[in-house]
Image (spheres, rainbow, N blue to C red):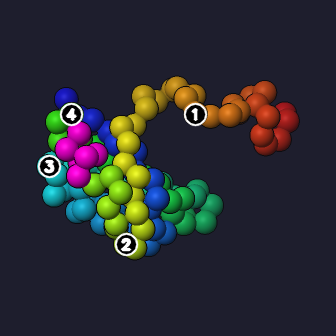
Amino acid sequence: MAQKLFIGGLSFSTTSDGLRDFFAQCGQVTSASVVTDQFSGRSRGFGFVEMSTAEEAAGALSQLNGRQLDGRQLRVEMAQASGTNAGRSGSFHGGTRGRRW
């Protein structure tokens, strides 16, 4: 079963294709995407890579965490399941950040 990885510390020049190519050395990459700002289109410095198996994802984590890509040191972690608020200090409604509605 496919496993998604969170990739932090990306250079602003790193593309989704570059991210895919870099992780392909560890196995089959199902998808790779650099997260961009919706208004400026500029990279937000992180992205996601989905490897075809959990074993390949674990191998990518151990082999590529801390390695350099486009002049920046990567932080590779197993991605959290969507819908969780782990590690977030506020929420959209009623959180301590942002505008009050």
Residue at 34% x, 67% y is 69
Q: Earlier in the sequence, mark 2 or mark 1?
A: 2
Q: Which of marks 4 and 2 is nearer the N terminus?
A: 4
Q: Position of residue 43 (x, y in %)?
A: 51, 63
Q: Rounded to the nearest whole Å, what is the CA distance between mark 3 and mark 4?
A: 11 Å
* Label 4: how many Cα within 10 Å (few below 14, some 14–19, many 20+): some
Based on the displayed image, in which of its 4 quarters is residue 101 positioned?
top right
Contact flag, marks 4 and 2 (Cβ < 8 Å): no
Q: Earlier in the sequence, mark 3 or mark 4?
A: 3
Q: Which amino acid, by three-letter code, is at mark 4?
A: Ala
Asked if the stretch drawn in magenta spans residue 62, the answer is yes
Question: Over which residues does the magenta segment extend?
Answer: 58-63
Q: Is residue 33 left or right of residue 42?
A: left
Residue 87 - label = 1
Q: Which of marks 1 and 3 is nearer the N terminus?
A: 3
Q: Rounded to the nearest whole Å, what is the CA distance between mark 4 and mark 1?
A: 23 Å
Q: Nearer the viewer, residue 14 or 67?
A: 67
Residue that carries the numbered disc 3 in the rendered image: 27
Q: Which amino acid, by three-letter code, is at mark 3?
A: Gly
Residue that carries the numbered disc 2 in the rendered image: 70
Residue 85, above or below 8: above
Residue 54 - label = 4
Main SS type for the magenta part?
Answer: helix
* Label 3: how many Cα within 10 Å (few below 14, some 14–19, many 20+): some
Based on the displayed image, in which of its 4 quarters is residue 13 positioned?
bottom left
Residue 8, above or below 43: above
Q: At numbered mark 4, what does the secondary structure look like: helix, strand or loop?
A: helix
Q: Position of residue 80 (x, y in %)?
A: 43, 32
